[in-house]
Amino acid sequence: MPLLEVKNLRKVYTTRLGGTGVEALKNVSFAVEAGEFVAIMGESGSGKTTLLNILAALDRPSGGRVLLNGEDMAGVRERDLTAFRRDNLGFVFQDFNLLDAFTVRDNIFLPLVLAGKAYEEMDRRLQPLAKALGIGDLLNKFPYELSGGQKQRTAVARALITRPAILLADEPTGALDSKASGSLLQNFEALNGQGQTILMVTHSVTAASHAKRTLFLRDGMIYHQLYRGQRTREEMFAEISKTLTVMTAESGEKSHA
Amino acid sequence: MRKFGFYPKLAARSLRLNGKFYLPYLLSGVVSAAMLYDILFLNMNRGVYAMKGANAVQGLLGFGALVVAIFSFALICYTNGFLMKRRQKELGLYNILGMEKRHMARFLLWETVYSALICILGGILVGILLSKLFLLLLCLVIQADVVFGFEVPAEALAYTAAAFGAIFLLNYLLNLLRLNRVKPIELLKGSESGEREPKTKWVLAVVGLITLGAGYGLSLTVSDPITAMTLFFVAVILVIVGTYCLFTAGSIALLKALRKNKKYYYQTRHFTAISGMLYRMKRNAAGLATICILSTMVLITVSTTVCLYMGVNDILDQMYCRDVQTYVNHGAPEDLPKVKALYERKAAELGMEMKDFAALCFYAPATAYANNRTRIDPYLAQADGADVVGDPNDGPLRVYVGCNLAPDADASLFSAAVEVGASQLELSNEWCFTDDCRTGRTDFWASLGGFFFIGLFLGALFLMAAVLIVYYKQISEGYEDARSFVIMQQVGMTEPEVKSSIRSQISLVFFLPLLAAACHTAGAFPMTRRILLLFGLSNTGLFVLCSGLTLLIFALVYYGIYRLTAREYYRIVRR
């Protein structure tokens, strides 16, 4: 059984006056096995964000199903959703979303505090994680004292401290310079190497080239997918670029036709 | 021609768009202008002039008008500062879109003109509508006959307009100063830049402890009412300074200590509340201290004036135990028979029946009596019957000689006759003035009624200020916190947790000042009680009751505001 299964997902946004709907997702199906590192690529308006919001249980689909560990997310009651999200999913956002009022340590502890864990347990989980992400020395600092890369690694630690089934990352390198991006992606690969399932939505070909598999989304549908297999990062980079070029060219033709 | 209309239009639009912030500001401006107008109206009303005991009331009203004016200024400055801070982003945007600072100055000028017009015109209108009500209320509390007719004194209008015009002009100048200091990039960033975590300031904490301790100490140790009266303001200032210092330094120390306690800190309810409070404690502290001081002012003003008013009959019974009294200043005891003879002669001349003479009324004697036995006993020995009135504990000593008259007799005529007669007597020392106590009672009612009225009036004003500050504080924090709560929900904070966390944070902000205010009121109790003794009020039970009731009612009103504000805050955060 795959860890995450998306079946015939549809999402229609209707305008407020009940006029014509916009179909953000038409018919999306894919599966993510435990231990995978999947990148989802697509242009703005391709439905990436909608897809991620539905996977994150922040939005409900209009049709189709999302199964996590075989459990249908539609079956989770509204008031249990937050707890469900907290226990199963970890999030990393483009703009970090750290809280200025908390130290790095407290920012990372936040989900565990919300889950009502004891301090000792939280501290036990934090130590190896902080070391792996290289933020062990920063724990007493405040977010406004950190660089972008440090902030994002803090955010990753916060996402992983609940030991989620899947780490969902929305443009995690979007606000980082190339050096910070590189080290963050290496962190992702290392975490994935230890068995962490990661699903990342991105614009960046470099970011996607670190993933084991890349899905291409266009006009609310899966257009194509690439497995990295034995390919090097450079080969993967070239492959993804080629696919993107073809995909963009096709949509250009379509709109001109 | 189009250019002329641009800034006025822009300013009007901006006021409308920022309605959520400007409405309470303008509303409080209207209310304080109305209050100023009404108090000036009462001060200048010809009907009030004609009332018995009007002098005392007029004086109190004049003092009240001054307090209202000064306070309105402080209040409008505070809220204006808050509004400007919130709008920095908007101004920054205008600046970047090519509006120069001098254009912005013009834009702000129009805004100020609109605000001033709304406050002054609205305030005067509301004031005129309410003036009759206030007049009736004043007549009621000072037990004067109802004044008929309706008037709008031009002077009151002019003073109100001038005072508020000046207030808004000053505010405008302050805004220009603010505008001049900032750079466009800072304007754009506005209030959202992160603040450093405050350091624990031990010196400030110690200063706070010392001043607060000194203030409380003064209140607890001063036993002489006259000294209490003179030192009261010293104590007030000490407590105000102490409150500011302790709220600033003490709160940070306390929050940091709470944060150190890991078991307590890492609980959903406390986690966000403590870190949030600590994060903006520098600003919070001054606001909380101000709310605390204002609440204390409301509590003390209202409780003392209410108590005086409720106890007015006690006071009168002690002060005026006869219809006509002669106050013994340094009069010698040997002269007492002469004075008595004078009373009898004058009564016979005027054909009045004299009753109950020879009473010596000791007003609030006891310790005073014990300390002055050698002085008082000779009087007692000379008198046929002695009447000792007042609290047997303490209070200033006064000695009177007096008598009662038939209900229809003219007490003022009699007292005047005695007064004249006494000046012709050959007395070894001067006996002081003779009072017609029936008039005295009416006058006293009037002045205590005036106190009561002013107490409630100013109490209402202080309360409004406290409400406004609390409201703005919570609203501004709501906007700052909205992002944090979105993030917390993303990392797994449930709806009920958001609610309980907000409740925890807001209740701390609300009930800390209330608690401190109750503490201050209790601390001031010994001193205020002694000051009340000066007025002749020695009924401590009544004062305790009045203080308790005032605190209860205030707490209820405060709780109502808390609920309203919490709801508004929650709505903002949940956006």
Image (cartoon, rainbow, N blue to C red):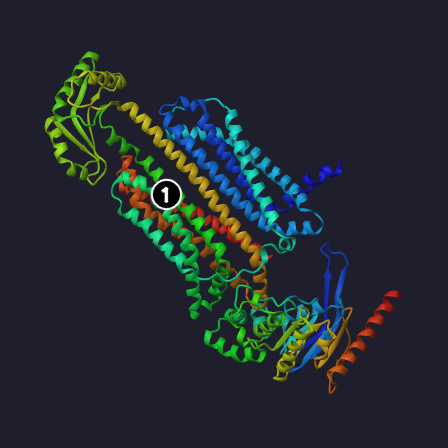
Q: Tell me the quarter of the image containing the N terminus of chain A.
A: bottom right
Seen from this angle, which residue lies furthest front? B181
Is residue B481 positioned above or below B293 on the image? below
**Relative to residue A76, is residue B1 drawn left or right?**
right
Q: Callout 1, which amino acid?
A: Ile
Label 1: few (<14), some (14–19) or many (≥20) C-alpha neighbours in 10 Å: many
| Residue depicted at x 51% and y 37% | B31
- Is residue B143 left or right of B197 when viewed as pictured? left
Chain ID at mark 1: B
Q: Provide the residue designation for mark 1.
A: B300
Viewer-side residue, A25 vs B244: B244
Where does the image place residue B563, in percent across and percent down from the top left? 49, 51
In the image, residue B11 sits, relative to residue B563, either above or below, namely above
- Is A100 placed left or right of B388 in the picture? right
Whether residue B434 is visible here, answered yes or no, is yes
Position in image of residue B192 (x %, y %)? 59, 57
Image coords of residue A209 (percent x, y): 73, 79
